Image (spheres, rainbow, N blue to C red):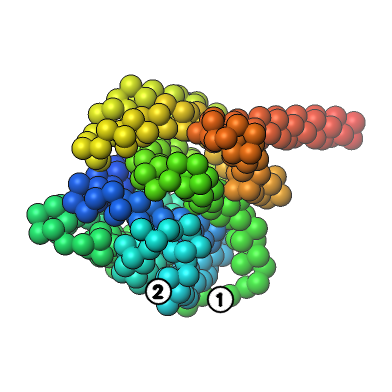
């Protein structure tokens, strides 16, 4: 087996479980929306969407520490510095637990203010605050689980992460059906069942360490400021990348409430559920490629690194085209799953579905470009691109749509913004490659002269 065939085999080993795990979790998110829509109603569906940005902020902060830490961990692992690598893991998990506890308490005690800040109106306020009240305590576990899953994947156990996440999602879905559709309990049980699924996933990871699989070990961390700074610098782009989803959701919630009203938020929540599966699949590809790219960078194996990057790029171009095409072709059927008894809602959601998901065709390769800069520790470039995905081109196009065109073309603002990010990121990657080739050529010429 030649080197490229071995890289292909490793790529499949890491990426397929990552994509499956992410896809199943995304399907659960959609199923959760269907259950809430059918069992609680349009207000419940919109209330969940109002709170959704805060869940994504928690994930973004978890990814800041875990992805940044995992990149540094795999870099040291590639250099056979295993003690340093394990201490990076211990520091990351300890910080995740501390931050998770703070966020859980803050979101619980300030839930009213947070719901209003997210753009809730009077009709949604009560349901949204109840949902956030019961969801908040689980933010601690969400932080820890996110960190453990990413580090364990980097510890050569991608299948375990897939099994844990899939099992948690399936149990969560079953409990949703029982409590909401069969027993007709309220929106608080949508949050409680979500938390039960998290705890089950956490149990899987606990057994991994109890059986002492892999190289990771839980010890009292030796905190080093240089390590923490390096982790945060490396993971900051991922934080912004994850943070972009709640920021974009927040932006469109405000714009849609202003131009369409409460029914528009409900329609947007349905489209958001569909887009979440596309987005999570693309993240699954990048998360699967990350351990390999970080490892090859640590080994200074440039050929293997670039081959893995190009494999990820190809997959993240093909997959969104297929998934967006499916969402458009079956848009009517998808809408009917959520709420089929409101023709106005159905028509509005189908209109959004024709345009809004198209942005993911640009998002896929952009994510791989951000990963390229992260794994090579060109943190300034990855951070700039990720920051612009949060606050920048998309907001400009949304503002232009509202102020100049009375909201027309609003749903295309997402695509136009992401196209700008793709063009910028690809230009920077190509420039980085040319610079590295030039440096290598200069180095070879210097050695030949001596």
Q: Position of residue 203 (x, y in %)?
A: 26, 64
- Provide the secondary structure element on which disc 1 rests: loop
Q: Earlier in the sequence, mark 2 or mark 1?
A: 2
* Image mark for residue 230: none
Rendered position, 38 above or below 59: above
Residue for badge 2: 108
Mark 2 or 1: the one toward you:
2
The residue furthest left is: 182
Residue 339 makes an appearance in the image:
yes
Q: State the image quarter where residue 44 is shown.
A: bottom left
Q: Does the residue at mark 2 contact the one at mark 1 (Cβ under 8 Å)?
A: no
In depth, the one of 143 and 180 nearer the eye is 180
Q: Residues within 10 Å of mark 2 (few under 14, many from 20)?
A: some
- At horizontal 47% and vertical 70% (from top left) the residue drawn is 113
The image quadrant where one finds the C terminus is: top right
Residue for badge 1: 222
In this rendering, position of residue 389 left or right of residue 271: right
- At horizontal 51% and vertical 46% (from top left) the residue drawn is 258
- At horizontal 39% and vertical 61% (from top left) the residue drawn is 122
Rendered position, 91 above or below 378: below
Q: Give me the C-alpha separation between circle 2 and circle 1.
A: 31 Å
Q: State the image quarter where residue 144 is shown.
A: bottom left
Q: Position of residue 310 (x, y in %)?
A: 55, 29
Q: Position of residue 316 (x, y in %)?
A: 48, 31
Rendered position, 243 above or below 198: above
In depth, the one of 398 and 213 nearer the eye is 398
In depth, the one of 392 and 446 nearer the eye is 392
- At horizontal 55% and vertical 39% (from top left) the residue drawn is 367
The image quadrant where one finds the N terminus is: top left
Q: Residues within 10 Å of mark 1 (few under 14, many from 20)?
A: few
């Amino acid at each position: 087996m030649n080197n490229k065939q071995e890289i292909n085999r490793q790529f499949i080993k890491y990426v397929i479980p990552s994509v499956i795990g992410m896809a199943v979790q995304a399907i659960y998110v959609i199923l959760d929306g269907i259950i809430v829509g059918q069992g609680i109603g349009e207000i419940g569906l919109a209330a969940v969407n109002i709170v959704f940005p805060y869940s994504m902020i928690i994930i973004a902060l978890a990814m800041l520490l875990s992805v940044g830490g995992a990149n540094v961990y795999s870099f040291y692992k590639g250099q056979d510095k295993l003690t340093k690598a394990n201490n990076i893991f211990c520091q990351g998990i300890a910080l995740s637990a501390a931050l998770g506890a703070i966020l859980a308490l803050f979101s619980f005690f300030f839930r009213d203010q947070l719901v209003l800040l997210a753009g809730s109106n009077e009709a949604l306020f009560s349901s949204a605050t109840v949902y956030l009240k019961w969801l908040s305590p689980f933010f601690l576990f969400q932080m820890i689980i996110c960190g453990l899953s990413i580090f364990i994947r980097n510890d050569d156990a991608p299948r375990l992460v897939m099994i844990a996440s899939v099992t948690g999602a399936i149990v969560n879905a079953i409990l949703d059906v029982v409590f909401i559709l069969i027993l007709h309990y309220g929106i608080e049980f949508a949050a409680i069942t979500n938390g039960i699924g998290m705890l089950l996933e956490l149990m899987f990871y606990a057994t991994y360490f109890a059986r002492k699989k892999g190289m990771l070990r839980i010890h009292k961390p030796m905190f080093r400021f240089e390590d923490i700074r390096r982790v945060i610098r490396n993971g900051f782009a991922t934080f912004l990348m994850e943070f972009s989803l709640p920021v974009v959701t927040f932006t469109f919630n405000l714009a849609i409430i202003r131009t369409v009203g409460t029914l528009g938020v409900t329609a947007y929540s349905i489209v958001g559920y569909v887009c979440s599966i596309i987005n999570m699949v693309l993240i699954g590809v990048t998360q699967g490629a990350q351990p390999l790219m970080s490892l090859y960078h640590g080994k200074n194996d440039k050929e293997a690194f670039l081959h893995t990057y190009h494999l990820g790029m190809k997959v993240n171009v093909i997959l969104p085209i297929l998934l967006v095409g499916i969402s458009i072709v079956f848009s009517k059927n998808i809408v009917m799953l959520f709420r089929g008894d409101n023709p106005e809602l159905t028509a509005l959601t189908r209109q959004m579905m024709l345009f809004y998901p198209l942005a993911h065709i640009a998002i896929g390769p952009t994510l791989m470009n951000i990963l390229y800069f992260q794994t090579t520790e060109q943190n300034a470039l990855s951070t700039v691109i990720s920051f612009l995905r949060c606050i920048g081109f998309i907001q400009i196009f949304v503002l232009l749509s509202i102020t100049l065109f009375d909201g027309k073309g609003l749903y295309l603002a997402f695509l136009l913004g992401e196209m700008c990010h793709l063009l910028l990121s690809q230009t920077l990657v190509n420039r980085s490659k040319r610079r590295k080739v030039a440096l290598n050529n200069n180095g070879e010429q210097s050695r030949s002269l001596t």
